[in-house]
Amino acid sequence: MTNEITLLGGMTLVTFLIRYPLLAMSDRIVLPARLIQALNYVPPAVLTAIIVPTVFIENNSLWLSPSNPRLVGAVAALSIGLWKRNLLLTILVGMGIFLLWQSLVA
């Protein structure tokens, strides 16, 4: 138990020490407009890098078939997201279709 607490404390300290100096100086640092514009693409790029392998790869091979519940759920979520532009609805429909498809196929 004390090892876990020490580990969590150490990770918290390291994270704080890495980020705090930049936050403390943020009012003095002026970033170019082009850099700020480019930084807007970081969250979608990171989420895509996390989600795409999860959806398409199973056991180190590409799984593109209707029996892939993650792919069916992702297509449903993408469709609802583009149509309604509502994050909560997108998550609920995507997870619902994924769970339904998984129970039907499995």
Image (spheres, grey):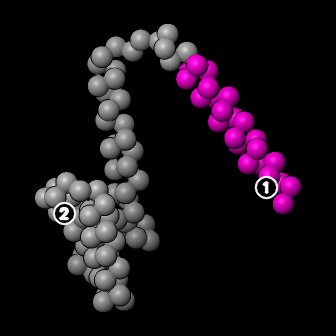
Is 9 drawn above or below residue 22 in the view shown? below
Residue at (41%, 53%) from the top-left corner? 50
Disc 1 marks a residue whose amino acid type is: Glu
Is 99 drawn above or below residue 43 in the view shown? below
Q: Name the residue that disc number 2 marks.
A: 80
Looking at the rendering, which quadrant does residue 23 occupy? top right
Residue at (41%, 11%) from the top-left corner? 30
Q: Is residue 73 visible?
A: yes
Neighbourhood count class around disc 1 (C-alpha, 10 Å): few under 14, some 14–19, many 20 upward: few
Q: CA distance from mark 1 to mark 2?
A: 41 Å
**Whole-percent x, y for residue 65 in the image:** 24, 76
Seen from the viewer's position, the closer of residues 99 and 90 is: 90
Say if the magenta span includes residue 11. Answer: yes
Looking at the rendering, which quadrant does residue 35 occupy? top left
In the picture, the disc for residue 67 is none
Say if the magenta span includes residue 5. Answer: yes
Magenta stretch: dominant SS? helix
Disc 2 marks a residue whose amino acid type is: Ile
Neighbourhood count class around disc 2 (C-alpha, 10 Å): few under 14, some 14–19, many 20 upward: some
- The quadrant the C terminus occupies is bottom left
Label 1 SS: helix
Q: Is residue 6 left or right of residue 83?
A: right
Q: Name the residue that disc number 1 marks.
A: 4
Q: Is residue 64 visible?
A: no
For the record, the magenta segment spans 1-24
Q: Is residue 83 left or right of residue 8?
A: left
